[in-house]
Image (cartoon, rainbow, N blue to C red):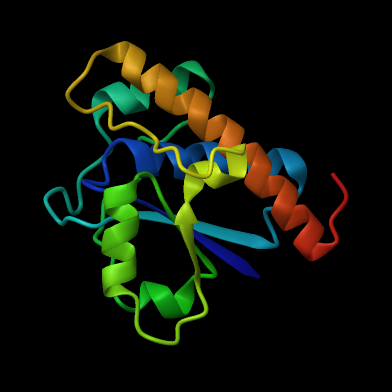
């Protein structure tokens, strides 16, 4: 089993969207039984809360239901449990590196690396309009396809 964790700041916009989109793509690719996925935030402001209603609505427009997801905060145990800890932006990645125990073998990188954009962040749509949530979905869908491709190769799964 390969374990993937998506990480953003507050855990109510980008990372739950990534979890929902990625989980849907796992189902479509036939990798559900080989990959476990979760999401969290580096900050604990929204623990236990559902994703932002705008994120839920934008995801639902694309057939992805994230309404049942609940926010939680990144913890040290995540670095033992997960194989990939994928950050939505550079600040999240810095926080991940700051928390990661020395000697951990977890893959820590920006999520958009898997969309061929190794230095690009998924922008936080929280303070913007609906178009920001659409952009986030476009970026997450592209990165999810790239990650699915890598995981398929890693597991020997044919897409």
Residue furthest to the front in view is 119
Which quadrant, please, contains the N terminus?
Answer: bottom right
In depth, the one of 25 and 83 nearer the eye is 83
In the image, is 108 to the left or to the right of 34?
left
Q: Is residue 49 above or below residue 97?
A: above
Q: Residue at x 30, y 35 (%)?
A: 13
Q: Residue at x 21, y 46 (%)?
A: 10
In the image, is 95 to the left or to the right of 153?
left
Residue furthest to the bottom in view is 103
Q: Is residue 21 above or below residue 132?
A: below
Quadrant of residue 43 in the image?
Answer: bottom left
Q: Residue at x 21, y 28 (%)?
A: 126
**Residue 73, image x, y percentages:** 24, 61
In the image, is 136 to the left or to the right of 13?
right
Residue furthest to the left in view is 45
In the image, is 25 to the left or to the right of 159?
left
Which quadrant, please, contains the C terminus?
Answer: top right
Q: Is residue 22 above or below residue 151?
A: above
Q: Taking the image as drawn, is residue 126 in sight?
A: yes
Q: Residue at x 85, y 61 (%)?
A: 156
**Residue 61, image x, y percentages:** 47, 16
Q: Taking the image as drawn, is residue 68 in sight?
A: no
**Residue 137, image x, y percentages:** 46, 26
Number of on-image labels:
0
In depth, the one of 69 and 101 nearer the eye is 101
**Residue 158, image x, y percentages:** 88, 50
In depth, the one of 133 and 54 nearer the eye is 133
């Amino acid at each position: 089993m390969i374990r993937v964790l998506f990480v953003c700041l507050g855990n109510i916009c980008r990372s739950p969207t990534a979890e929902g989109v990625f989980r849907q793509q796992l189902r479509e690719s036939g990798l559900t039984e080989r990959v476990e996925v979760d999401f969290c935030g580096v900050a604990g402001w929204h623990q236990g809360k559902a994703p932002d209603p705008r994120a839920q609505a934008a995801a639902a427009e694309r057939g992805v239901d994230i309404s049942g997801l609940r926010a939680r905060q990144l913890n040290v145990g995540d670095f033992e449990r997960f194989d990939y800890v994928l950050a939505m932006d550079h600040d999240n990645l810095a926080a991940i590196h700051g928390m990661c125990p020395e000697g951990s073998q977890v893959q820590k990188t920006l999520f958009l690396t898997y969309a061929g954009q190794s230095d690009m962040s998924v922008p936080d749509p929280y303070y913007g309009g609906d178009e920001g949530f659409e952009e986030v979905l476009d970026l997450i869908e592209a990165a999810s396809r790239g990650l699915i491709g890598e995981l398929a190769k890693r597991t020997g799964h044919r897409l």
